[in-house]
Image (spheres, grey):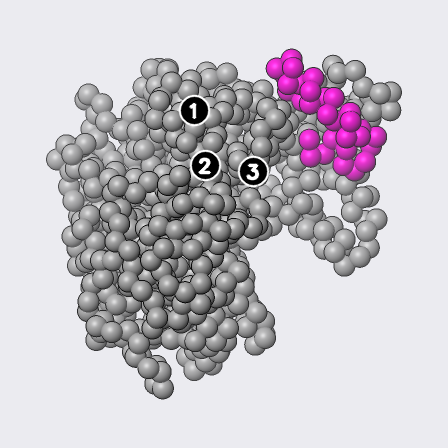
Amino acid sequence: MEEMDFLRDLNPRQREAVEATEGPVMVIAGPGSGKTRVLTYRIAHLLRRNVQPHRILALTFTNKAAREMRERITALVGPQANSLWMGTFHSVFARILRREAHRIGYPSHFTIYDTEDSKNLIREILQELKLDPQVYAPNALRTRISLAKSRLISPEEYERIPRLRQADEASRRPHTYLIYHKYVEYCRSAAAMDFDDLLYYFYHLLDAHPDVLDKYRQLFQYTHVDEFQDTNHLQYRILKKLTLYPESPENICIVGDDAQSIYAFRGADISNILSFQKDYHNVKVIKLEQNYRSTAHIVQAANKLISYNRRQIEKSIWTDRGEGAKIHIMTNTNEGEEGRRVAQKIQEICDRYHLRYRDIAVLYRMNALSRVFEEYLRRLNIPYKIFGGITFYQRKEVKDMLAYLRLIVNPHDSEALKRVINYPKRGIGKASVERILDFARSHGISMWRAMHEAALPTKAHKAAAELSHLIQRLHKLAQTEDAYTVAYRAFKLSGLERELKRDDSTEGVERLQNVLALLDGIKEFVEAEEVPYGAEVDDRSLYSYLQHIALLTDIDLKDDDADYVSLMTVHSAKGLEFEAVFVVGLEENLFPSFQTIHNPREIEEERRLFYVAITRAKRFLILSHAESRYLWGRQVYNEPSRFIRELPEESIEFPVGKVKVIPDIQEHFVTAPRAKISGTPPQQRSPAVKIDPQSFTPSPPEEVRTGQRVLHLQFGVGKVLTIDGVRDKRVATIKFDEIPGPPKRIMLKFARLQILN
């Protein structure tokens, strides 16, 4: 194919981005503007110019995006695309760590812990230190450790930084630094890394070993980064280490959209894309502003909405796909009516416009809103799937099987051993397991070594020896055989097959089928023609398979051929598109979240999140809100989201027969309308108390006690009358001094209260 023919399908801006191969390039890609096409053609263009594929690094944020790009490049230039270094940050750097792990004191076949493994390890540490898990919540600790790693703060540095120690003491978690120390120590003894470690240790590998750094600087001649607005501090530091140094050609192309930066809660830093031009020299900036996805009313609404954000790179998205349908606003009395009308509207759209169910998505700000939509979709026999719930790989029976496979590859994986040491039952009881764990802790060794060295009762000792022999036998097999051969033998020899077949109930049969489906998946991995993600070329070993699935996300498992309505949070919908999109629960304090309404920067992120939601739609966009909603155990009244008010009136269609309850659609509300809780009807609410958000410091929710005087940003000063519920579901009854009517019931987890006494 001639070069001219090769690029003729690109518009002028896309072509400019593809041909600008030398030096730093920043492509600002609006939604639906063909950024994947630009990256695909850019890499294919380099290959056609005889750049060797292994010299090209392409980093994405989902395996789905990497798979789509590789398939497109293969179609353009052939199988040499298989030799590209392409994948997510985690999968690519895990490949390198596997090669270089000995440099940082890890074996090459280290285990990758998922979120549940990490939380289980933290629970074990809390038990060892005799700390209250209600105060030291495992999920909060995992997040704290994760954020420390993303800022390149080691356990030793964490202990020395006063502001971190002071924050932990204020949260009644002064021993967080010690938990962080032990967490890192136990991960090392188990030869395990969590997701953050894949980046954290990769950075330290480059930083501590100049020869390794120079090797990969020379290897990666051209670096590409997709969704750059979602990079965190650590990811950007790694990129700069690889591409920004004396004599560097700075051949880095970043593609992103600041208007779609929505992951600050995970550590993503929008300033990375906003300051890119300051860090690199003579950056070529190219804006992709033509939207190929959505019709004009949707594009106009998105432009008007995002114009309210101050921190942004200016651009004007346009489309030539025609006006299309106006945006439909659905006003409902309560969440039941919302669920019913959304389900009916889905059926109506499918019937009238001949859409498939898989062309439709229902998006919400938080998972708690999904229940009512599930109920009404079931009533109409409309198939659906929820993303963000328990995935296939999180099912107990699947995790049990995977634990055996992890143990075969890495016998020192303590989390895997704890899971299967007595499953199926083999005579190693709870007391013996505790004895093994105590021995491991006191001697600073892995649970696997402790199982061999600790003094155990005769029966347990014999059972441990048999388990050890089985794992070692399979470990040896894994050195020469592919993943499926080893997994199938493990299924048979471990007793799992016999255990699962014993239960002939409906649930038991389903569990057996799930494990058989897992084995089918391993067989597909072994027989696949393309390179599996996280794997070396032609590596179909058990270790390679485990690394592959450890890096999968919920969206990666989405079956594009199955016909069901997709239910998911807006965060989960990033990168997807649908013919029709329903954005539901569009009320103040829900979307935007009440946790953000007094922080201008957080409101801007909420607005970007809504921007992402509406730009998932190709043809039909339905925005729904309810006047009242049963939430957190109470009936809650919220006004329509300010974001609806920020949309252009000419692009909105209000349903016939409904009162137009959204006044002054053009008005920009800087301050959120106050939430109206049960017992305070809308017309009786009093003005919100004005408090300076800058001087407001919320106290840790677990410190709130009955009888305290507290300050709330909206309701002012009040007294805590009662507290009920447990852990993160504690609900306080508070009588606020200046708010008439009955006391308010507020979930402490979300309340943001400042304790005054």
Q: Nearer the viewer, residue 717 or 335?
A: 717
| Alpha carbons under labels 3 and 2: distance apart | 15 Å
Q: Which residue is mark 3?
A: 134
Q: Position of residue 105 (x, y in %)?
A: 50, 16
Quarter-of-image position of residue 163: top left
Residue under the image location 45 percent in, 36 percent down: 143
What number of labels is visible?
A: 3
Q: What residue lies at 82% left-to-right and 55% top-to-bottom? A: 504
Amino acid type at circle 2 is Thr
Tell me the distance, in whole angstroms, between the alpha carbons under discs 1 and 3.
31 Å
Label 2 sits on residue:
143
| Residue 481 on image: x %, y % | 66, 31
Q: The magenta stretch spans which residues?
A: 418-447
Q: Would you call the spot at circle 3 few (<14 residues within 10 Å), some (14-19), or many (20 or more)?
A: few
Q: Residue furthest bottom?
A: 657
| First of labels 1, 3 by sequence position | 3
- Give the overall secondary structure of the magenta segment: helix
Residue 113 belongs to magenta span: no
- 401 or 706: nearer the viewer: 706
- Residue at point 32%, 45% (across, down): 227
Determine which of the numbered discs, if any, sits on residue 201 in the image.
1
